[in-house]
Amino acid sequence: MNLTFVIGLLGSLILVLGAAWPEPKHPKHPVQSLKNWLFAVGGVVMMFYAILGYLQGSSIFFVFMQLLIFVSTVLMMLHVDDRIDSVILGISATIIIIWSLYLFQGYTTIIFILGLLGISLGYAFDMGTLRRDLALTIGSLLIAYFSYVEANWIFFWLNLFFAIFSGFYLLKRTTREQHKQTTHLRATSKSKKHQ
């Protein structure tokens, strides 16, 4: 067990804790959310891990991922509008896509890029939304697959658990939204019958 592994494990634990941590019921600003702070701190630690890993022969793509997540974290904490987030991350992802295609190492590169974009958008989207949970879930699954192919087990397990927890909140939020709609439809139907 070397220092790089310990840093990766620590960053992974922080990020998985962030994925598992519930969002505040009534989010006001991202900096008031412990979940977002866990994402931010975990992301910084994983940036060090990705750089150290690259210096020891690991894939440059993990450094790309952490760079885009860093941009996403800044946008998240500044509470930038989702439309602006999408444009900034779209431009950043396009640059990384072009760079990645230049370094093309097979079709898993495309899976990596799509996963990276999903996670980045998930970070930057507003708290407490279906699209945030969906983007984090899909992005994490794709990065987990890429990490498996690259045999980077820290990133594999991190993204697998991240996807599981994000998927749990996605399912929970979807169920809650469906329940609200059903309740609303029943109430509307009853009021029409009484008229």
Image: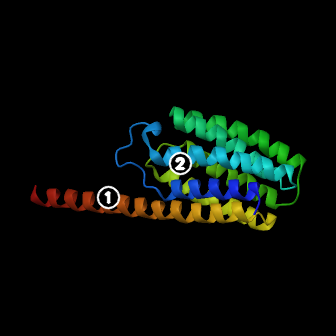
Say if residue 3 shows up in the picture.
yes
Which residue occupies the foreground of this view, 173 or 161?
Answer: 161
Q: Is residue 88 above or below residue 146?
A: above
Which residue occupies the foreground of this view, 183 or 115?
Answer: 115
Q: Residue at x 56, y 42 (%)?
A: 124
Neighbours of disc 1 within 10 Å: few (<14), some (14-19), many (20+) = few
Q: How many marks?
A: 2
Q: CA distance from mark 1 to mark 2?
A: 32 Å
Neighbours of disc 2 within 10 Å: few (<14), some (14-19), many (20+) = many
Q: Residue at x 65, y 43 (%)?
A: 44
Q: Is residue 101 above or below residue 30?
A: below
Rendered location of residue 194, percent (x, y): 10, 58
Q: Which residue has dot 2 on it?
A: 38
Look at label 1 and name its amino acid. Gln
Based on the displayed image, in which of its 4 quarters is residue 9 positioned? Answer: bottom right
Q: Residue at x 47, y 60 (%)?
A: 170
Look at label 2 and name its amino acid. Leu
Quarter of the picture holding the N terminus: bottom right
Q: Which residue has dot 1 on it?
A: 181
**Labels 1 and 2: the sequence-earlier one:** 2
Rendered location of residue 76, percent (x, y): 54, 38
Mark 1 residue element:
helix
Rendered location of residue 57, percent (x, y): 88, 55
49 relative to 76 in the view: left or right: right
